[in-house]
Image (cartoon, helix red, strand yellow):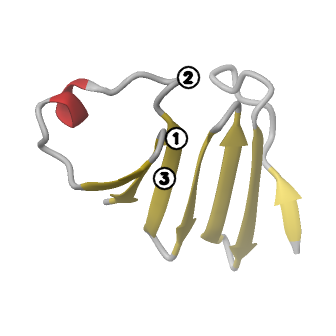
Amino acid sequence: MIIPFPYNSFDDDGDIYSITLFGCRIWVFYYHDRFGYFRLFGKGLKWKDVSVHGLTFSEREKRTKALTINNWRISFLK
């Protein structure tokens, strides 16, 4: 069963969905304004449009590995 998360004060009109089985979240998906991520069993991918969302410190210093295609940056979640 896919259910939306309850409202979170940090969520600014983004869409968050999850699948929970026996009290454990096994799948989570978030999308908002050309940025998003998904997790499956704790591992996942995130993506963002760097023309809209700037790079974080670790991305600028190349401390995180990512694939960049045009203005899109795709990286792993730990």
**Residue that numbered label 1 is attached to:** 48
Circle 2: residue type: Val
Distance between the alpha carbons at the discs numbered 3 and 1: 7 Å
Q: Is residue 58 above or below residue 37?
A: above
Circle 3: residue type: Lys
User: Disc 2 on helix, strand or loop?
Assistant: loop
Residue 5: where, in percent of width, then height? 78, 47
For residue 46, which numbered disc appears in the image? 3
Residue 54: where, in percent of width, then height? 41, 22
Distance between the alpha carbons at the discs numbered 2 and 1: 8 Å
The answer to whether the residues at label 2 and label 1 have Cβ atoms under 8 Å apart is yes
Query: Callout 3 environment at 10 Å: few (<14), some (14 to 19), or many (20+)?
Result: some
State the count of labels: 3
- What residue do we see at 69% from left, 79% from top? 22
Give left or right: position of 39 versus 23: left
Give left or right: position of 39 versus 5: left
User: Disc 1 on helix, strand or loop?
Assistant: strand
